Amino acid sequence: MNAYLASVLENVKTKHAGEPEFVQTVEEVFSSLEPVIEKHPEYEKYDLLNRMVEPDRMFTFRVVWEDDNGKWHTNRGWRCQFNGAIGPYKGGLRFQKNVYEGIIKFLGFEQTFKNSLTGLPIGGGKGGSDFDPAGKSDAEVMRFCQAFMSALYRYIGPDVDVPAGDMGVGGREIGYLFGQYRRLKGVWENGVLTGKGLSYGGSLIRPEATGYGAIYYLCEVLKHENDSIEGKRIATSGYGNVAWGIMKKAAELGAKVTYFSGPDGYVHDPDGVITEEKLNYILEMRATDPMHCKPYADHFGCEFVEGAKPWGATDVDIIMPAATQNDVTMESAEKIAASGVKYYIEVANMPTTNDALNFLRAQKHMIVAPSKAVNAGGVGVSALEMSQNSERLVWTAEEVDAQLKKMMINIHKVSAEAAEQYGLGYDLVAGGNIAGFLKVAEAMLEQGCF
């Protein structure tokens, strides 16, 4: 590795030793940048990388709320405004009990380059809390969201920082957060949050956008290989909005998801999740019991394997991990490689450990695509929601979908071109990192490394 890159990485490992997710994602991005740093000595001259791995600012605050039994609870909240060089900070809020500062920081760093790839003027940010909405009543979630926004509202705004949803933060939570923002500010700034309900400024197809975008990106990969999506069998993980969007768009284009998983195990449906009945059942299932996918197998009479993931199945053509970070370990990667599958398309944020990702990239029969490029459609449609809000317009589903497809085609194009430009062939992981990095780096230099 280039000496400058190595020194910055060593600095990150020392300063953030207790934040392995953040160290992992910095290491993954840096692994692609050596030819870029060699070509741009000005990055080392102005110490751009050490600037880039530090957030612009990070807010930590307490969130105090009352449950239905009158008992008070104290959680921690965070908002990381990581890099605003190309636009207002943009990124989701995650409510999960395992959330801590290191996860927020890794997601903010990753978001910076993902947002850059969209081609839209949005910077990178992320936030959340160690609050777990699972098992809480609507009233408890509302009181928590109101307390959270009471701490957050002074740091955000349509031209400052625009949060969205992420794990544990869906339409219900966004509604409660926006209501409290209005109450505190006394203004109608519906561009301050995205993922809103359609009744107050939300965008059509936002829930499906990340999954739809992932399929559009996949189609470009297949096209590059003189292949097509029709008839393809897909294994994914999760069954939330992202996986559901993958299932829905795949079925529309003639493919089918035949494996999906939940916290309790995985489902194998050889016929695929392709009918309205099955897609609607998944919506109902995750609304009533987000921790178990076995009810699907029971209802439709298909196989369920407890406590396992579908990685290594030999009767699929494409693998799309879409659940959470570090879902695919080295052990799983070895099974995936041995299965003979050709296409490994990351969808969740950093779903593959670095050693597993490097192993899969080294397989000559496989094409690997990175999450920061593949899942950028979600934040892309969030930015389109911001545009609709600023123009006081509501676009049709067809208009949003057309913009999303155009965006994903371009993300694949610039990623492939960046890899080719630096002599890396059709390396989509490296290309995505390079293309995302270069735009942010250029903006920082032009603004005096701001």
Image (tube, helix red, strand yellow):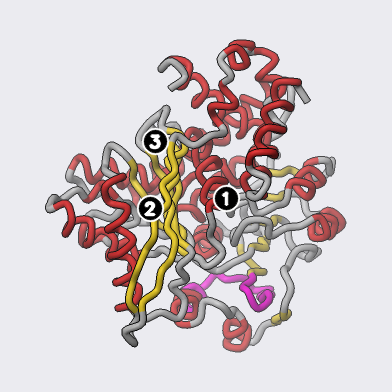
Query: Which residue is labeled 2 in the image?
Result: 164
Residue nearest the viewer, comparing 382 with 317: 382
Residue 280 seen: no
The three-letter amino acid code for the residue at tag 1 is: Gly
For the C terminus, the image quarter is top left
- Is 238 located above or below residue 277 in the figure? above
Name the secondary structure under disc 1. helix
- Is 63 located above or below residue 343 in the figure? below
Region rendered in magenta: 261-281
Look at 73% across and 79% down and name the residue there.
305
Crowding at mark 2 (Cα within 10 Å: few <14, some 14-19, many 20+): many
Query: Which residue is labeled 1 in the image?
Result: 102
Residue 124 seen: yes
The three-letter amino acid code for the residue at tag 3 is: Ile
- Is 265 located above or below residue 431 in the figure? below
Residue 241 horizontal side relative to residue 301, left or right: left
The three-letter amino acid code for the residue at tag 2 is: Ala
Please give the label number shown on residue 421. Answer: none
Residue 383 horizontal side relative to residue 28, left or right: left
Query: Which residue is labeled 3 in the image?
Result: 122
